Amino acid sequence: MFTFDWKRLSMAAGLSLTLIAAGCGSDDGNESTSGSDSEGSSGASEEVNYGEEMDYEITGIEAGAGVVGAAQTAVEEYENLAGWEVATSSSGAMATALGEAIENEEPIAVTGWTPHWKFAKYDLKYLEDPKGVFGGAEEIKTMVRQGLEDEKPNAYTLLDQFQWTAADMESVMLEINGGAEPAEAAKAWIEENQDKVSEWTNGVEDVDGTEVELVYVNWDSEIASTNVVAEVMKSKGFDVTITPLDNGPMWEAVAEGEVTGMVAAWLPATHGDLYEQHQDNLVDLGMNLEGAKVGLVVPSYMEVDSIEDLQPAE
Ligand code: PBE
């Protein structure tokens, strides 16, 4: 019923704008924005009120994730997201909800990111973000505690030299998604990518049980990267602990010098506020992966292309 009313409403709006335009001849273009909106009423994107079917809810992940913060900003900044909410849970719950929605061909919008196995498993697309709320191209960077270079130079060098591609990360994520233990998936990848790994360990001497603690968040991408780095460090003789935390505490732990470091800094946008807060108290070792991205992700069968195609709650 609501869909029908909505369509009629926008058709009526389109009609009256047409009349206004006809009456005014070439006007100053004041109506151009709403005029182009009303044109959309004949397009596929407004055939279905996805918002209503989705309970006006974006399926988020952990509350502290940057992409969740960005989604909340999107809800505030996009007028058409009036009345929408970002539901927070976990990355695992998001992936389950996405899989179930796709199985039932239902609409869903998740806080998504690349690299991620979901793009290999499902047919998905990012919604365009004309306001740029989710930022542009992101990179993943490595941050370590101050003093590490002097105290544990081999750990420092290895972490500094760690660098791989989105395809590398995705292949580890896919193994884990397929049921492999993260450490086993990491070891298998290392085995097959000795060339790359030897660049990371170049100049790194074997050590005898030097303790290292890496922090990360239980995001699929960071489970993959942190396990790979941990296994490489173990192979050089380090005694490695990996500790999952929330996003804010992960940054704090490095900045306060409580742990060795992390390979999970998404910049410049996703963790921009955390970087600003802590950058003076940690050492930025630069990019370890380029070509990352965050945004709202929907199944390709949804007939929407832009965040602006979603309808407000009424
Ligand atoms: N993510 C994955 C993180 C960064 C890595 C996109 C879920 C975030 O939003 O903070």
Image (tube, rainbow, N blue to C red):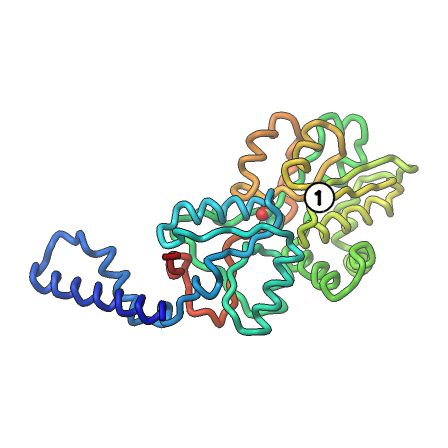
Q: Mark 1: which secondary structure?
A: strand
Q: Residue at x 42, y 69 (%)?
A: 303
- Residue nearer the viewer, 267 or 60: 60
- The C terminus is located in which quarter? bottom left
Question: Residue at 62% across / 48% down in the picture?
Answer: 62
Residue 161 in view in this figure: no
Residue 173 point in image, percent of width and height:
70, 59
The quarter of the rendered structure image containing the N terminus is: bottom left
Q: Amino acid at mark 1?
A: Tyr
Residue 34, image x and y in percent?
Answer: 24, 57
Which residue occupies 67% across, 35% down?
A: 249
Q: Is residue 27 visible?
A: yes
Q: Is residue 253 depicted above or below 61 in this figure? A: above
x and y, in percent, of residue 101 in the image:
57, 68
Instruction: Establish if 276 lies above or below 37.
Output: above
Neighbor class of circle 1 (other Cα within 10 Å; few <14, some 14-19, many 20+) is many
Residue 122 quadrant: bottom right
User: Residue at the location (55% across, 31% down)?
Assistant: 276
In this view, 150 is above or below 107: above
Q: Is residue 104 left or right of residue 32?
A: right
Q: Is residue 205 above or below residue 304?
A: above
Q: Specify the quadrant of the image occupied by residue 47.
A: bottom left
Task: Looking at this view, name the residue that lies furthest to the front.
Answer: 1
Provide residue 151's location: percent of width, then percent of height: 80, 27
Label total for image: 1
Left or right position of 283 against 150: left
Q: Which residue is mark 1?
A: 216
Q: Left or right of 123: which side holds 83?
A: left
